[in-house]
Image (spheres, helix red, strand yellow):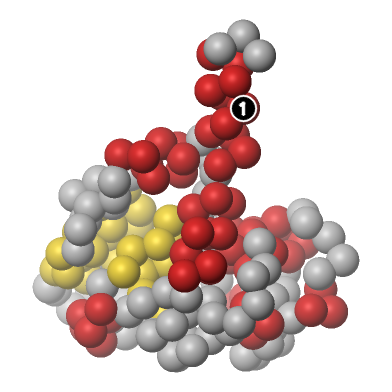
């Protein structure tokens, strides 16, 4: 899986209520949720995002309540991947289940600045900074997780497996 986009950097300990505030949880439509992505930080944040851009986060991104709407909002805003220092455990699982790629890079996230152009090779575990040069290497995505993402998340993955079994 290859991705190229502009980095949109946020800070540390960004919780799910900042990603998609509770007042917008009246739908599960990713596009509608995406219109309000990061509204808990800045109501106009998403207006700076273009399809294919990449969210870059500090420590403990996605902490707080278990809210499947948070990764859906990121996807709905047009961002298919988040590069972060670290992720809250429940958010990590929800993200992959919803079809959002997360790449955990630790302190190397400090090599990325807001607006940098990133090139990501998830299969190899490489994040290249095309603006400043440099490369971040992290563990490549396990095949089982790649298979889930390739089907748009866990529901698509299970549907295909059931169909293959004739169920």
Q: Quadrant of residue 54?
A: bottom left
Q: Residue furthest top?
A: 166
From the image, which quarter does the C terminus lie in?
top right
Give the residue pinned by disc 1.
Answer: 159
Answer yes or no: is residue 158 visible: yes
Pick whichever, 138 or 134, lies toward us.
138
Left or right: 89 with respect to 15?
Answer: left
Question: Residue 128: horizontal and vertical position, in percent?
Answer: 20, 65
Q: Residue at x 21, y 80 (%)?
A: 108
Question: Residue 53: horizontal and vertical position, in percent?
Answer: 46, 65
Question: Residue 16: horizontal and vertical position, in percent?
Answer: 62, 78
In the rendered image of this protein, does residue 13 appear above or below residue 104? below
Q: Residue at x 46, y 40 (%)?
A: 148
Name the element at disc 1: helix
In the rendered image of this protein, does residue 54 appear above or below residue 41? above
Pick whichever, 47 or 10, lies toward us.
10
Q: Residue furthest left?
A: 134
């Amino acid at each position: 899986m290859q991705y190229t986009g502009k980095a949109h950097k946020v800070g540390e300990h960004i919780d799910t209520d900042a990603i998609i505030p509770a007042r917008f949880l009246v739908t599960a439509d990713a596009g509608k949720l995406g219109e309000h992505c990061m509204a808990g930080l800045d109501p106009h944040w998403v207006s700076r995002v273009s399809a294919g851009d990449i969210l870059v986060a500090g420590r403990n991104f996605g902490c707080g309540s278990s809210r499947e709407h948070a990764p859906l909002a990121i996807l709905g805003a047009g961002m298919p991947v988040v590069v972060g220092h670290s992720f809250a455990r429940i958010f990590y699982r929800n993200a992959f289940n919803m079809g959002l790629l997360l790449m955990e890079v630790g302190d190397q996230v400090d090599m990325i600045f807001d607006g940098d152009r990133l090139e990501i090779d998830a299969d190899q575990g490489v994040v290249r900074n095309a603006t400043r040069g440099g490369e971040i290497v992290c563990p490549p995505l396990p095949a089982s997780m790649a298979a889930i993402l390739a089907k748009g998340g866990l529901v698509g993955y299970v549907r295909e497996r059931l169909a293959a079994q004739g169920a």
